[in-house]
Every structure is written in structure tokens, then in C-alpha cells.
Image: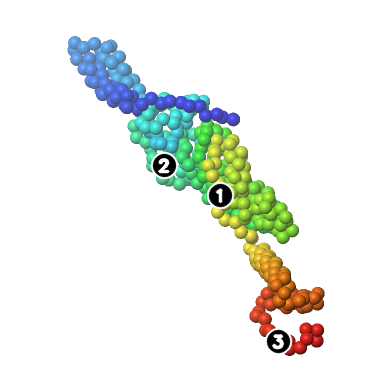
Amino acid sequence: MSVEKKAHAASGWGMLGVNLGMYLLSPVLFIVAISQMTSWNGNALFGFFLLLASCALFIAAIIVSCGFFTLQPGQARVCVLFGKYVGTVRDEGFRWANPFYSRSLGTSSQGGVETASSGSKTVDALSSLGGHRHASKISTRARTYTGDRIKVNDKMGNPIEIATVIVWHVQDTAKALFDVDDYESYVEMITETGLRHVASLYAYDHMEDDDSNASTTITLRTNIEEVSEALKAELDRKLEVAGVEVDDARLTHLAYAQEIAQAMLRRQQAEAIIAARKKIVEGAVSMVDMALSQLSDGGVVDFDEDRKAVMASNLMVVLCGDSEAQPVVNTGSLYQ
């Protein structure tokens, strides 16, 4: 695996002065060479050497011009000399490096990599064009990737729809360009496969048969933070080979698949009704016990077992019924 090496590039302003001096000196030598070769008292051989020096100086000035480039904050340039990785320059500003460093490294399809400069001007035209392009500059800024909704089975085998968004950045430029073919496509592919794997490890929600473990069981719906941390750890582990680090990972969509959505909705409604009924019954039993205890302890009514049973039955009907109770006044004995 490749490992990023730090490289430094000289300031471009000093080399710019040298380069301008070479461009100015070249025509001067050319004029002196022509005058030496054409004048009667000139030295033709000396003029010929001056002509060669002028041409060589002009060619050298052009080559030196190709070494200028600029780096903005959050950018890095990968330097490769004749196929050998030399290092990565992260020094921002106007810089100059070996003009023979390669300018065509890897491919990009989404704008994360920018084209290296040519001469004293940065070639940014390709940065706005779609499709693949070659580059030696790479962005180290944080980026976001929003995945599409995918269908996957959770731990219980229920089909669910899930989607995620991740925030990531290039940590190791050497791995990003040399260890994978296209690191942006690699991030997209690994994000989808990692989300499928993590979603299959957890159930969508708690079932009625695992209420005893509801407080400790992690589910996709109720434990968003834990699931997000598990997804981030999974992506960090798989994207390390591409030199990419995940800053954050969050679920953006979570729902049952359409084929079981209605059935699951009815199950949730039934669970809600059962829970409500259970709460009502618990409250009614408490109220009946309190009423009988206060009536007996206060000496208001002397209840035997039969009267307690009738009173409890009547109170439970009144407290647990869906509709209002219609009272019936008994004018006779309680036992008739």
C-alpha cells in the first residue's frame, strides 16, 4: 500500500523573477549573436555559440514556466517524477516545483480532483466540465455523499428502505490516487455495501416478544446514534485502503418496504391499542382497590366478599368501558 510523503515546493515568486530574466535575456543574446555573425568585424563562431545559447535559454525558460502552480487551502498536489511517487505538496499559495512532475494522475468523475497548472496560469477550464479528466491536484476538503434509497433485509428478515449521507475527506493522497482506480466511485460503492451490512445487523424495531430486552437491544429506529457510529466505523475500516476518512455518517431515510408497510402499520396500531388498554386496566384496578379500601376503612359501607365482587365488577365496567355507563338504581336488596 502507498503511504503519503510530505514534499515542499519553493515559492513561485522568486522563480518567476528568474524566469522573466531568462525570457528577457534570450532575445538579447539572439540579437548579439546575429550582429556577430553578420558584421564584418564580428566573430562568426562566437555568434554561432551565442545563437545556440539563446535558443537553449529560451527552451529552458519555457520548461521552467511549466513548473508554476497554485494551491488553495484544502488542496494538495501529488508529485510523480517519471512514474515514481516523490511526495505530496500541501503548501498553499503560488509555488514552483520540478516542471517534469507528471500532470496526469488517475481519473475523477465528480470534481474532487482539479487540473494542474500550466505555466504561470492555472488551467481551471476542465474543473467545470463533466466526465472523466486527468489531474495531479486533489481536494482534501470535506465532502458529502448522499446515497440513494436502497432496499435491504433487517436482522429479522423484514424488507426495509434505508438511505444515508456521509461526510468524508481524503486523508492520504497517495492511497487515494495509487491504491484504487477511482476513489470517488470507490467511496460510493463502499458506502452502499457498508450500509447494507450494518442494516442487516439490527432489527428495524422492537418486537412484542423481546420487550424484556428492549432497553438493551439496539434497533435501527430507536438507536440512531449507535447505528450511525457503527456505520461510521464500518466505512472507516473499509475506506482506509483508499486513504479516505469518514467524518460523520447519518441515516436520512428509514422505513418499511411498501409490500409490508401496511401490515407493519396495523401491527403498530394494535400494539398501541394493547398498551393503552393495559394502562387503563392498571389504573382501574388501582382505583377500585382504593375505593373499596376507603369505604371499608371509613366505616361507610360494611362489605362482605359478595358485595366487594359486585362493587369491583361495576367499577371496572364504568372505568374500562369505551362508552359512558348508564346507571341502574337498585331499590331492592343487593342479593335480589
**Can you say whether 273 is above or below 64 in the image?**
below
Foreground residue, 284 or 322?
284
Report how far apart the C-alphas of labels 1 and 2 lie in the structure. Answer: 32 Å
Mark 1 vs mark 3: give the one in front. Answer: 3
Mark 1 vs mark 2: give the one in front. Answer: 1
Foreground residue, 168 or 18?
168
Q: Is residue 212 left or right of residue 164?
A: right
Residue ID for mark 2? 126
Residue ID for mark 1? 250
Mark 3 vs mark 2: give the one in front. Answer: 3
Mark 3 and mark 1 in contact (Cβ < 8 Å)? no
Q: Position of residue 243 (x, y in %)?
A: 55, 35
Q: Residue at x 57, y 42 (%)?
A: 186
**Can you say whether 276 is above or below 109 in the image?**
below
Q: Position of residue 73 (x, y in %)?
A: 41, 36
Q: Residue at x 77, y 76 (%)?
A: 303
The numbered mark, 1 or 2, whose residue comes first in the sequence reads 2
Report how far apart the C-alphas of labels 1 and 3 lie in the structure. Answer: 63 Å
Mark 2 and mark 1 in contact (Cβ < 8 Å)? no
Foreground residue, 253 or 52?
253
Q: Position of residue 283 (x, y in %)?
A: 68, 68
Residue 329's label in the rendered image is 3
Sort mark 1 into few (<14), some (14-19) or many (20+) by Cα contacts within 10 Å: some
The numbered mark, 3 or 2, whose residue comes first in the sequence reads 2
Rendered image quadrant of residue 296: bottom right
Q: Tag 3: residue type?
A: Val
Sort mark 3 into few (<14), some (14-19) or many (20+) by Cα contacts within 10 Å: few
Foreground residue, 303 or 182?
303
Report how far apart the C-alphas of labels 3 and 2 lie in the structure. Answer: 92 Å
Sort mark 2 into few (<14), some (14-19) or many (20+) by Cα contacts within 10 Å: some
